[in-house]
Amino acid sequence: MPKSLSADIKNDIKSALLAGKGSMEVANRFGVTYATVNNYANKFFPNRQRGLRGRPMVVSAQTKRFIKLQVLQGQLKTAREVHDKLMELGYRISYKTAINMTGDA
């Protein structure tokens, strides 16, 4: 049977999580596993917000909506025009990324 953590360590984990520390950082600091910290975090804060996962978007959702509107209005007709417009707006992306983005929009 696994040993349970002392009340002091549990309180330290709780206060570190409240201070905005990441689970991995808290685990390393108190010498427990990442899973243990997550288990206690889920127990202490059942409705906590988790960090965003995955690769961040290159183009913001607002810009995507703007591009989609321009495509629907007929102001942008080709992926090349979309790419040029994004470059004009300050995005440094490849033509291939612009093609992929037009499929998502």
Image (cartoon, rainbow, N blue to C red):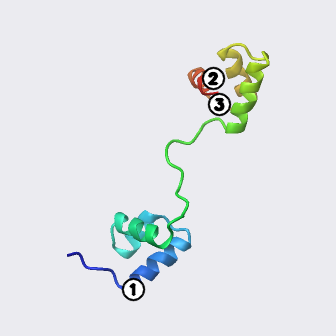
Q: Which residue is mark 2?
A: 102
Q: Which residue is mark 3?
A: 92
Badge 3 element? loop
- Where 56 sits versus 90, above or below? below
**Nearest to the observer: residue 42 or residue 29:** 42
Image quadrant containing the N terminus: bottom left
Badge 1 element? helix
Query: Which residue ends up furthest to the left in the rendered image?
Result: 1
**How many marks overall?**
3
Disc 3 residue type (three-letter) = Arg
Disc 2 residue type (three-letter) = Thr
Residue 70: give x, y in percent of width and height: 77, 22
Residue 86: give x, y in percent of width and height: 71, 27
CB-based contact (under 8 Å), mark 3 and mark 2:
no
- Identified at 56% across, 21% down, the residue is 96
CA gap, disc 2 to disc 1?
54 Å
- Identified at 41% across, 71% down, the residue is 40
- Identified at 59% across, 23% down, the residue is 103
- Identified at 33% across, 71% down, the residue is 32
Of callouts 3 and 1, the N-terminal one: 1
CA gap, disc 3 to disc 2?
16 Å
Given this view, does label 3 or label 1 mark the residue nearer the observer? Answer: 1
Decide if residue 68 is in sight here.
yes
- Where 53 sits versus 60, above or below? below
Of callouts 2 and 1, the N-terminal one: 1
Q: Badge 2: few (under 14), some or many (20 or more) residues near its Cα, within 10 Å?
A: some
Given this view, does label 3 or label 2 mark the residue nearer the observer? Answer: 2
Question: In the rendering, which numbered label is found on residue 7?
Answer: 1
Image quadrant containing the C terminus: top right
Residue 73: give x, y in percent of width and height: 79, 19
